[in-house]
Structure formats: C-alpha cells, structure tokens
Image (tube, grey):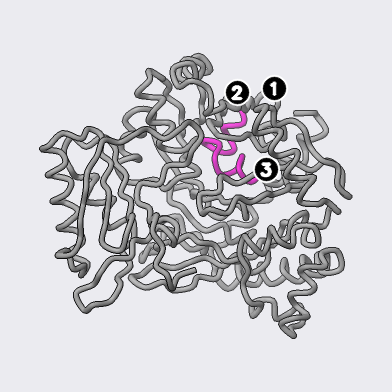
Amino acid sequence: MPEWDVPHVLGAALAEGRLAFRDRARLERHQDALARTHLRWVLPRSPATADRFRAAGLPPERWRELPPVGKPWMMAHFGTLNTEGLTLEDVLRVGHAAERSRDFRPTVTGRSGEVVVGLSTGTSGSRGAFIVSRAERLRWAGVMLRHLLPGWPRGLLTPQRVAFVLRAEGGLYRSVQHRWLDLHFFDVLRPVEELAAALTAYRPTVLVGPPSVLRALHAAGATARPARVVSVAEVLDPDDEAALASAFGSVVQVYQATEGLLGLPCAHGHLHLNEAHVHIDLEPLGDGLVRPVITDLRRRAQPVIRHRLDDALRLHPQPCPCGLAARRVQAIVGRQDDALLLPGRAGNRLPVWPDVLRGVLADVRGLREYRVTQVGPHALILDLDPCTPDMAADATRAVHAALNRVGVDSAPLTLSTQSLTPLPAGHKRRRVTRAWTPPEVP
C-alpha cells in the first residue's frame, strides 16, 4: 500500500472504535445525522435519486418512507443514479474484460478520480454492476481491518498475511497492501490442486473465502492454521462451520452483497448488522424471517437508498454478550426466491425456507454434499454425493419428514435422486433452490 494511504485506512479502522454503539437510541441518532449529511450531498448529484423523491412527493427528511427499489431498477437507472458520470456500458466493458482476463487492476475514471468496477455473480438471475470510489475503498478497507484482523489492535504489531479466495478481486487488497499487512488474491478459477498448494505455501494468518471453496481446498490438500477464517459470499451452514473450524481454525462470517457491507462479526464472533454505516429496515416474511431494505449512509459513487434485497434473515432473539446495540443475526437463511413453494394440507401453496431442508440433510450420515431443486409444482430433485441406494433412501426419508413437519402435503410430491455434479469453478453454491416459478409469480 502506498505510504500516503496508510493514514486513511488506519484512520477508518480507528474510527470504528467510536462507532461501537451500546445504546440503541444513540445509534439511531447517529444514523439520522449521517442520513442528513448524505442526502444533502447525493440529491444534487444523483438525478435518479432526486426523481424518486419527487415522484413520491417526499422531502429528503422523510427518506424512510421512500418506496423501495431493487437491482433491476438500479441497473436500468445506472447512468443517472451514479455520481461519477459513468455509463453502464463503460462499466460493463471494463468489468467483463476483467472477468475474461482475470486481471482486476484496470479501473475507470469518474468525477472523483479512480473508480473500481465489479460485477455481481447474478445468483438471482439479474447480474449487477457496482462501482466504488477510492475514498469508499479506503474506508471499507479500514472497517474490514478493524473487524477481521485477529487481536485488534495488537495484531498490527505482528506481520499479517490475509488470503482472499474469491471469484473476483474488487480492488480491496490493492487498497491496504503494506509491509506489515500483505493481502493476496487467490483466484478460484485456478485448478483446485494448484490453488491448494499456493494457499499452503502462503501460510495465511487470515483466510477469507466462500465456505464451499474453502472446504474443497482442504479436501485437495491445503494445510493452514490461520488465526481466523472468514466466511463470505455463501450461506454458512452449521456443517460448513464445523468442517472449516476442524480444518483451519476459528470461523466468523461477513454479510456482504453488491449493495454494500451489511454485517460484520463482533469480538465474540457473532454476526451483527453493520448499522453504524447502513440503515436497515426489516420487512417480515413470516415464520420469523425478515427481508432487509437498506440505505447505505456512506456510499456516494453509487447511492443505495431504500434498496430491497432478496435475502431472508433470521435475527437472534437474545442480545449479544458483546453489548453492541446493532442487531444480531442468527442466520442468513438464503434468498427469498430460493424458498420452495409446495402444496400445503389446506390446499394452499406453502413457502418452505431453505434452512428447513439444510438442517435435516446435514444430519444424514455419510452425506458429503447435496442440492435440492424444485423443478415443478410437485417435483423435487435431490442431487447427492454419494448417491448410493441407501443414501438416496435416507435423504428422501429426511426430506419427507421435514416437509411433513412444516405442513406440506407430501402425497402429490415426487422426489427423484441423482448423483451430484460439482459446480463449475467460481459459481456460488446454493444448496436449496427453486427452478420453477408459478404462473402468477413474476
């Protein structure tokens, strides 16, 4: 990292200490103050955001009442939403070139200077583009440093090697490279045996990556004992957490999306919403689940204001021992469009959330990996590894029992089993998905 970047990153990391609110009212007053400053800056520079307020007939101070938008709206209005004067075509050209070449160094030049470009994985069927300014990248690096570096701040006294095992690099490690802090990007599109050997040789003190990829690396022979393993990009199931803890060491989770950095671990290792920087409304989905509507109170290059995500979360019912006022997440259940829609006993169509099936299949003895896909109104396919007759029978029995418990009418259901085909490198794992859409659901 250039020496002139050190104060910016460390300053952001140190500032996090002043944002560890333990009183909910103080946290909300902090959010209000940030929102006023943020909107004063954004509205004159983001025509699409200003148009939303005009269309809703709302003044800026009533931003909480703004009707939510989603990723399709963001992409359709990209050119007038961002404050860097960039077109979607320019951003996509750079992003696609980086994906093809696997060289993520090229940037675009916006009004504020160098802007990093990234593309989302498109697991919801709608691939998004995002941009991050230099100032935002440095603040983000500082926040991540504060929350992920083991033993902060004493960890700064020991050279740290942080391995990011990801599909795309996104510019983070270039922001914080320094003689006492080496961040290295490991491209998941490399052959897994080659990647495992490189990771072993690197000897990371912090290991960051999707749980399915980290488990595959361990199976391919990767040996490392980092002080901390950080799960990103995929749902962290209990079986993943146990396997990674056994293979590499203590595991924490980061909740991040194209739309922002949404959740970080506390000193006790529990996941909290990142409410010092992002205002999050939670819409009830039923069965104790909620869906976030987020307003990033820091992000200026590509404003995110009242943006509805497809994620389904379950909040923890008990306060965290760490004492933070930011809400604690018990589980990221998955995407809302991953909920299966199956026949209920009352003749209705019943939503079944992914964690219902993930929990029981994790308990099937000898089952290494699986996928459950709804392919029709009454049809499920179970992809299993291994897929022996006994395993197929045990997995089918476990799925039927779980569905019966939540009120599904299993009589018309058909469950077929087949051998699991590994996902191509770089594809995000989704263990439970719905590939069928009822006619009345757009």
Residue sitting at x 30%, y 72%: 349
* In the foreground, 197 or 118: 118
Judged from the image, the secondary structure of the residue bearing numbered disc 1 is loop
Q: Nearer the viewer, mark 2 or mark 3?
A: 3
The amino acid at mark 3 is: Gly
* In the foreground, 319 or 182: 182
Label 2 – label 3 distance at C-alpha: 29 Å
The amino acid at mark 2 is: Pro
Instruction: Indicate whether 26 appears above or below 206.
Output: below
Q: Would you say 75 lies left or right of 216 here?
A: right
**Where does the magenta region start and end?**
142-158
Say if the magenta span includes residue 87. Answer: no
Q: Earlier in the sequence, mark 1 or mark 2?
A: 2
The residue lying furthest to the bottom in this view is: 57
Residue receiving disc 2: 159
Write down the quadrant of residue 73 in the picture: bottom right
Residue sitting at x 48%, y 20%: 191
Residue 300 percent location from the top left of the image: 77, 57
Residue receiving disc 3: 118
Residue 117 percent location from the top left of the image: 72, 42
The amino acid at mark 1 is: Arg
Residue receiving disc 1: 179
Judged from the image, the secondary structure of the residue bearing numbered disc 2 is loop
Answer yes or no: do the residues labelled 1 and 2 have beta carbons within 8 Å? yes
Specify the principal SS of the magenta part: helix
Residue sitting at x 63%, y 51%: 128
Q: What is the number of the mark on residue 315?
A: none
